[in-house]
Image: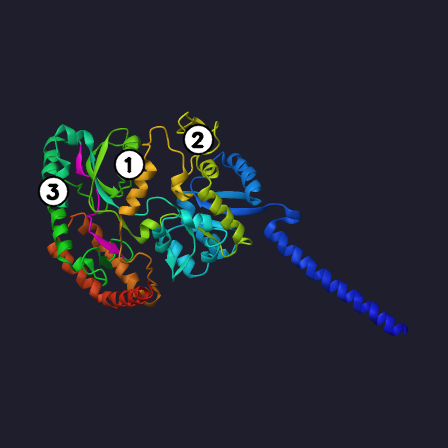
Amino acid sequence: MKKKKLGIILASVLAAGTLLSACTSKDSATSEKSGKNGEPYEIKWYTIGTPQKDTEKVFAEVNKYTKKKINATVKMTQIDWGDWDQKSQVMINSGEPFDIIFTNGTSYVQNAQKGAFKDIDDMLGKEGKKLKDTLNPALLEGIKVNGKIYGVPTNKEAARQSVYTFNKRLVDKYHFDLSKVKTLEDLEPMLKTIKENEPGVTPMATFKAYLPYDYIFNNEMPFAFAMEGDRDHVINQFETDLTMKTYKTMHEYYKAGFLKEDAATSKDSWPMDVENWFVRMGDSQPYADLLWSRSAKYDVVSVPAEDPITINDSVSGSIQAISATSKNPEKAMEFLTLLNTDPYLRNLVDKGIEGVHYEKNDDGSIKDLPARVDRYNVPAYSLGNFFILDLYENDPKDKWDKFEEFNKSAKTAPTLGFHFNSDPVRSELASITNISKEFYPALATGSVDPEEYLPKYNKKLKEAGIDKVLKEIQKQFDEWKSKQK
């Protein structure tokens, strides 16, 4: 009888212990996700940019707000521009637990493919529903990897538009008619005038000739789809008549002294605030000339080299991804939703504290105070939704409307949403990359005769296995295209 009682007592103790252990384990898991005793969950966020002196001060205010709104606080850590690529990748590879990280372009695709980021499709239908409703659908389409979304793109200009930008003082001085500029060849009369009359000015700031293609990697590599005509087959754009014609024009310009002699090897970034150039190329957005003129402290004016087009690079230039190591990805999504839909929080994270870092005018516009410039100056593009940011006092009132119009006017690139897996042709691509680095800069700046060097370039590409790579790209593209709705 005593043995039976003892057995019952032991069984009860063991059962209680098992139950206690299960409860403790459950409580521990809950604590990790929600914070002990209902305390806010701390979101660890890594983003790009020079660390700022007032980040802690700003985020003390951020955390007062997010604690009330979503029962979470945020620890933002900035990693400086020059250190970003290496340090962020080491952090991802180490498996360190964190919640959100800035990413873009090829890095985003590669890390998504290897499982470093969380697939957020389901959360965009739940915690991120309000966020999803604000995003340009082209942004989400363009960042899909194998049909899934692995980050929140910044809602800003979703298209690329290359432009020719001119020093307006010289345009006005010589009464140039920019409405006639449609092609590279149209620049010649103006370049000749500047060369003959402005000895302190280089007619063309160093740039690589524009070619209207949708590139699989970048414009240096020989894999592209045409924007017009046959948009379904990958080609080597360096074999086309258009490329030969364009590079011949650049070579004529180079021989005429319109570019610097070291154009192929120069590392000169041609800062806008140095008035030693007449025309340059770059990617634009609505009212870009106002921004560039403000930065340069003299007026510039641009004309398009192409119509706006939505490409993978233009939609994946700024993404916040949720780490696969996050202990509470749903809370991270709640924060990203709030950041991208709540004007108070978005402006606080971007501009700092009102009255300390900026002040607001009666009409709702803002102006920076010295403390913002000196102590809290973060890159707006890397943080989130542009369309709920306050305008500066000298911004056009319709700035965000023009951004919306710009996005809606853009044509979709053939490969928007297609991301090539290069593993099957890795060795061929390594050789082709080296060959392209050898030939492309000299050809694209006009530094060598394309009639001599383009055939040499294409011969070396053939020897390096370009046909195998083109075949693999086409195969993967066809498979991807067949799955599109």
Mark 2–mark 1 distance (CA, rounded to whole Å): 23 Å
Q: Are marks 2 and 1 in contact (CB under 8 Å)?
A: no
Is 357 drawn above or below residue 447 in the view shown?
Answer: above
Label located before the other in sequence (3 or 1): 3
> Residue 22 — which label?
none
Point out the frontmost of discs 2 and 1.
1
Above or below 228: residue 56: above
- Mark 3 nearby-residue class (10 Å; few <14, some 14–19, many ≥20): few
For the N terminus, give its image quadrant.
bottom right
Residue hosting label 1: 287
User: Which residue is at 19% across, 50% downward?
Assistant: 444
- In primary-sequence order, the first of circles 3 and 2 is 3
- 15 versus 280 height, above or below: below
The amino acid type found where label 2 is placed reads Arg
What colour scheme does the image use?
A: rainbow
Q: Which residue is mark 3?
A: 186
Q: Give residue 65's position: percent from left, percent from top.
A: 54, 38
| Residue at the spot of label 2 | 372
Label 2 sits on a secondary structure element that is helix
Occupied quadrant, residue 438: bottom left
What kind of residue is marked 3?
Asp
Q: Which residues are magenta?
A: 201-215
Can the viewer see residue 97?
no
Can you tell which of label 3 and label 1 is closer to the viewer? 1
Quarter of the C terminus within the rendering: bottom left
Label 1 is placed on what type of residue?
Tyr
Element class at badge 1: loop
Residues 56 and 205: in front is 56
Residue 136 coordinates in the image, percent (x, y): 36, 49
